[in-house]
Image (tube, rainbow, N blue to C red):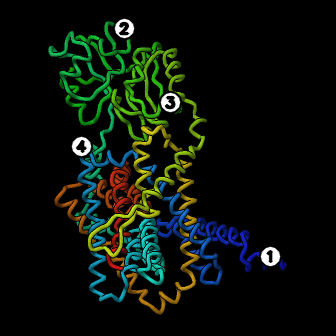
Amino acid sequence: MEWFINLLTKESIAHIILLYSFVIAIGVMLGKIKIFGISLGVTFVLFVGIVVGHFGFSVPDEVLHFIREFGLILFIFSIGLQVGPGFFASFKKGGMKQNMLAASVVFLGVATTIGLFYIFGGTIPMPMFVGILSGAVTNTPGLGAAQEALRQLHDAGQITEIPQIALGYAVAYPLGVTGIILSLILVRVFFKINYDKETANLNELSGGGVDNTKIISIQVNSKAIDGKNLSQIRKLIGRQFVVSRLLSNTVYSIPNGKSVLKNGDKILVVTTEADSEAVVAFTGEQIEFDWKESENKMVSRRIVITRGVINGKTLGSLKLRSVNVNCTRIVRSGFDLLANPNLVLQVGDRVVVVGTPEAIQRVEDMLGNTLKRLDEPHLITLFVGIFVGIIFGSIPVFIPGMPMPVKLGLAGGPLVVAILLGRFGFKLKLITYTTQSANLMLREIGITLFLASVGLASGGKFVETVVSGNGLLWIMSGFIITTLPLLIVGIFGRKVMKLNYFTLMGLLSGSMTDPPALAYSNVYSGNDAPAIAYSTVYPLTMFLRVILAQILILAFV
């Protein structure tokens, strides 16, 4: 048994791997346990790491710092790639209003933190307050960014010792999760929300700024368009729509820009929710019609883009209509995008086309439609992005009043580069698509390595600091930081902005980047409105929390 004792007690590569494996495995397992329907998920890895560290198990500092920072980079970069395609689109239409409200939650949280810092007269140092803030808003990347800023200050000689701010994070996190859900409940009670009424009202709204596609059958009945071709009709109406199928004189066909519509024709139209009424009003009247008979001559199919040469090309450049195929919409990241000639295609997009089986086969050959290709990891994009992100994050930015230049660091740099690659990577011929499972695996590996490292580093001082220090004050401060901004913005969003409660639930959950709160919202709403609002505000709030955590450290230390 001596070999086993040596494995547990003596520092070695095997000992370090064994320690991390134990902490992560037990933490992930315990994180699946739900209390009142709420679980802490992978964050439980942090608490297991603290317990293990408390009992004297440790990792050499150099190794621990490397694993912690590399795990953080993997986590941050994976998030950036995921949110990149929707980051800039989230500011369009109703998304701008939602993002401003979510940003208000972020800035109010920072203001509350600064206010408590001065109210307590410096009893709790600002670095620890930043740790409490990160835990209170359940934002692990913010904690990593703050630790990176502290390391920069230490390397520059501005501070002699790096504070263990993960202690504040660990203390504030549990009440942070429950505080977010409690705030959602309080807003519902305050306004006496009726779920049935909210559901009815939601059906009259456009779904939180996202133009969902709508498929409708129309019988042409308009003197203005009778005898005109589709190209002329599109210019006349000035709305977005695609005519997928045409029935004229008992003959089914796939229309193109030169196809002439006549009164009495029946057309299958794909358009947006916002434009559907106008399209119907201009063309005729909406009808119920079974297009099943048309399937004898034409079929509708989703083709997955898997060929790298298509990445970055516009839909119009493919000239699908030259092979007698009509494209109606593109499915990307779960959202339907109306087919537009100027729409830039990406690997992983699902192109919905209508045509004869022979024509569709030619399109499949053009686009790929080989799902196995999507399973291949694109490691070039990953490591090129990390390489550029670290360089970008190391660029000093001089801000008046700061004791030293601000850097995005190992957290902010890869995040910004990943967002840009996720949106514009196709222009550099980089394939940024990863399957959802691959992205999630990369994220989970990164965050568990980071949390295990933070827990092991903090465990030795945790009990002493919380019990004999200001532990209760930390908990109280964290709860205030969690609930006060949410209640202010929640009441304002409902009373002044008249937001639907389900949308508001997703917005507030997204402003805290908190998946448990989103899960709670989805269960009680019974629709996808919370998820849409969550995904709309998530990219901006994640970015703000990472950057502001560093600014707080650099401004007050």
Query: Relative to the observer, which residue lies in front, 86 or 507?
Result: 86
Amino acid, disc 4: Glu
Q: Position of residue 468 (x, y in %)?
A: 47, 93
Q: Disc 2 on helix, strand or loop?
A: strand
Q: Earlier in the sequence, mark 4 or mark 1?
A: 1
Labels 1 and 2 touching (C-beta < 8 A): no
Res 251 label: 2
Q: Position of residue 287 (x, y in %)?
A: 28, 23
Tag 1 residue: 4
Res 309 label: 3
Residue at x 45%, y 23% (from the top left corner): 300
Asked if one can make out residue 486 in the rendered structure from this viewpoint, the answer is: no
Res 171 label: none
Q: Disc 1 on helix, strand or loop?
A: helix
Q: Earlier in the sequence, mark 3 or mark 1?
A: 1
Labels 3 and 4 touching (C-beta < 8 A): no
Query: Badge 4, how many Cα within 10 Å: few under 14, some, many 20+?
Result: few
Q: CA distance from mark 3 to mark 1?
A: 54 Å
Query: Relative to the observer, which residue lies in front, 209 or 280?
Result: 209
Q: CA distance from mark 4 to mark 1?
A: 66 Å
In this rendering, which labeled residue sits more in front, label 3 or label 4? Answer: 3
